[in-house]
Amino acid sequence: MYAAVLYRLDDLQGARDQLDLLEPVTLTPLQRAEATRYRARIERSRSTTRFSGSASAAVTYEEDAAGALTTQFDSIFAPPVSQEGGAAVFAARLNIAHDLDGAAGYTAFGSIGGYDRSTFGDIDGNVRRGDLEAGLSYVGRLNSWNVSAVARALDLLDDPYMREVGLKAQARWRTSNATTFSISGEAVSQTFDEPGVDALAVFIGGDRDGWRYDFNAGLTHRLDARTTIGVSAGWQDKQADYEPFGYSGPGVQARYDTSSARGQYVAISGGIQWLEYDAPDPVFVGFGAPAREDTRSWARVAIGAPFSAFTAAGATGDWRQDVGIEGALTYGARDSAAPLADYDSWGAELRLTWRFGAAN
């Protein structure tokens, strides 16, 4: 349906015109339900003030849950013996956007999100995250950009671990009806609560606090109305008062998404990052050890569908198109030249999702 293509290109008026042309046309129940759904999306998107968001609940499993926790947050301690484990994960996000009067294309926006991971069994790996974002965006016919202030908080093992505040920006250019180029950057000031490190900071010259910078460039190409591929490359620079905790290096990511008329989808993504630490660490790694070098990689394959896909018509035009179920296989690894907190693990997820509002 060409209206869906125009909608994904943010040409709302063109998509609306195409849907008007379909009104007198005889369509299958699935096609009519899809047309009705896109018309509702367009009307929501044309509102001056728009709300959207998502919520999910999941059960996850990792064959090395203990190592995953230690390495994910760059702990200074060696990981425990490999131990499998599971967790219950809840996540939610609420977005608001308001078009500015007398400034066509300009929108003020805000977002709040939360994440809670509670582990099962003997592994103490509870993680909680929260974030706030507020900024300004612009959408034109062939380009768009946004700039915002962000604040994030991370609690690890039920204790405060990291706080960061800063700025982020992104710009996109549509080079053709199927291809979009983007660049993005972020600069945040990080503060960590690590009693073991903080107690030694006066003797070793600092702690993990410092600025983190991220820059990325990406390309997204739509193969057809329901299939998209994307690649990106970037650079990360983490500064730290204690120099051996600082690092920098490049990374690449790739993604493939495809869906059916009923809404079933397959999403495949992965990435790899190469990091070099700023100096040898005689305190936490040992005298004579070289500066740490990490190779970090991850991959995820997900298959999902809205509840409406399991009906006879394949579309319902109601809440069943907003609520779905997803299963995924995951992989994560980190190898360090100075053998510290190496990690290699497969995992699985089963997730229930709900998406709502103008962006849905």
Image: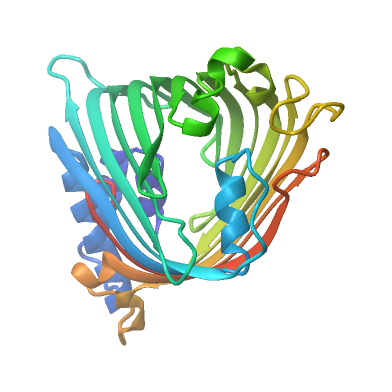
The answer to whether 207 is drawn above or below residue 85 in the figure is above
For residue 117, side relative to residue 83 (left or right): left
Question: Which residue is more in the foreground, 251 or 169?
Answer: 251
* Residue drawn at point x = 24 percent, y = 31 percent: 110
The answer to whether 64 is drawn above or below residue 277 in the figure is below
For residue 182, side relative to residue 139 (left or right): right
Total numbered circles:
0
Residue 229 at least partly seen: no
The answer to whether 309 is drawn above or below residue 291 in the figure is below
* Residue drawn at point x = 34 percent, y = 38 percent: 11
For residue 295, side relative to residue 59 (left or right): right
The coloring applied to the image is rainbow
Measured from the top left, where is residue 6 in percent x and y? Answer: 38, 45
Question: Which residue is more in the foreground, 270 or 316?
Answer: 270
* Residue drawn at point x = 59 percent, y = 43 percent: 221
Residue 15 at least partly seen: yes
Measured from the top left, where is residue 349 in percent x and y? Answer: 49, 69
The answer to whether 234 is drawn above or below residue 157 in the figure is above
Q: In which quarter of the image is residue 243?
A: top right
Q: Quadrant of residue 215?
A: top right
Measured from the top left, where is residue 276 in percent x and y? Answer: 75, 27
Q: Quadrant of residue 288?
A: top right
Measured from the top left, where is residue 345 in percent x and y? Answer: 66, 62
Question: Which residue is more in the foreground, 347 or 328?
Answer: 347
* Residue drawn at point x = 53 percent, y = 32 percent: 196
Quadrant containing the N terminus is bottom left
- The residue furthest bottom is 312
Question: Which residue is more in the foreground, 151 or 74?
Answer: 74
